[in-house]
Amino acid sequence: MTDQQPIDTQLSNHQEMLSPELQQVVKKIQDNKTAWITAREKESKATEQVDTLRQRQQKAISDYELMKNQRSALLNDSNGEFTPEVKKLRAKMIEQRETADDLEELLALRESDLTTLPWDTGHAASDYVREHNYFVDKHVDTLLGRFLSEHGAELLGLLNLKYQHLRRTNSKYIDGVITGVNDADILLKDFICETFLRPAKEDHDVINIDPALSIIGISPDAEASADCHKKPTPGQILKYKNLKQSDGSVNANKHDARSNNLVEL
């Protein structure tokens, strides 16, 4: 996912072969890639933190329930008398319940943040992939156009010579030549297909065919392409906004809920 060399080092190595305009474009693409990697790492770290908090919160609840059962057993043994041991356990229960509630609030906050972090990853990935694909599409056309402007006339002239020869040797007036099967036009198409089209579809080591492409690669990072689906839909954004608006009333009831929990101890 990460580059073997910093972008500044790679640009310096190819400075004489890249125009200032291309250097700016390549750096922008690499900056977009770095932004995606940063967003992805932030999302991953937040996910780990939420998982850890969830485990701690579940452990706090389990410990509280265990203390609650122990308290019930002590009260049963003492026939309902609030012995010093029962009172001490009750104090621990209050502290444990508060800890569980605090962890629950923190977990809810972190989970809320985690809702939008994948969206940030998706947006950053899409920016990087879109910028990369747009540049490669235009740049390859530019390279082909430059090649054809320098060698196109000679190439087309040679193909014309080939065609003229085929017309003489494979005329429809020659025995055994069938139009649409082995006439000059068909043979020229077969020649072009075998010489250019079929080899062009095969895998080639083209990474060093151009200094710009040697830096950014012919394709964007595969993981970035996969992360593009994390971009939110309009429905998800609307649902999130509605939930944020309702958070105020929910938070207003949390203090009363905690008080009721402590009263029940």
Image: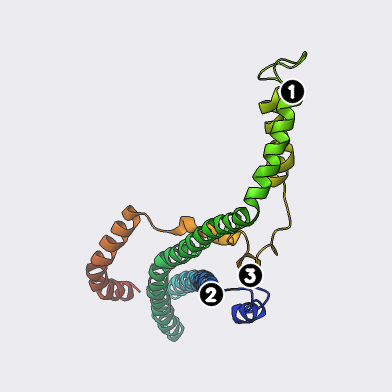
Q: Is residue 255 left or right of residue 135?
A: left
Q: Which mark is on residue 241?
A: none
> x%, y% of residue 2?
63, 72
Task: Name the spot of residue 201 as percent of width and height, x first.
Answer: 68, 44
User: Which one is in front in this view, the residue at disc 1 or the one at disc 3?
Assistant: 1
Instruction: Tell me which label, 1 or 3, sits earlier in the chain.
Output: 1
Residue assigned mark 1: 170
Question: Can you say which quadrant of the picture contains the N terminus?
Answer: bottom right
Q: Quadrant of residue 116?
A: bottom left
Up-down relation of residue 178 to residue 82 (above or below) = above
The image shows residue 103, relative to residue 237, as above or below, that is below
Which residue is nearer to you in this view: 25 or 222?
25
Task: Name the element at disc 2.
Answer: helix
Say which label, 2 or 3, has the lower sequence index.
Answer: 2
Where does the image place residue 212, in percent across and percent down from the top left?
61, 68
Q: Is residue 66 visible?
A: no
Q: CA distance from mark 1 to mark 3?
A: 48 Å
Gap in Å between the C-alphas at discs 2 and 3?
10 Å
Residue 84 percent across, percent down from the top left: 43, 86
Residue 171 lies left or right of residue 126; in this view the side is right
Closer-to-camera residue (53/69):
53
Residue labelled with disc 3: 215
Report the residue that reaches farthest toward the top: 175
Q: Amino acid at mark 1?
A: Asn
> For mark 1, does the 10 Å Cα neighbourhood hold few (<14), some (14 to 19), or many (20 or more) residues?
many
Q: Residue sitting at 57 percent across and 55 percent down? A: 145
Query: Please, which colouring scheme is shown?
Result: rainbow
Residue picked out by circle 2: 27
Instruction: Give amino acid for label 3.
Output: Ile
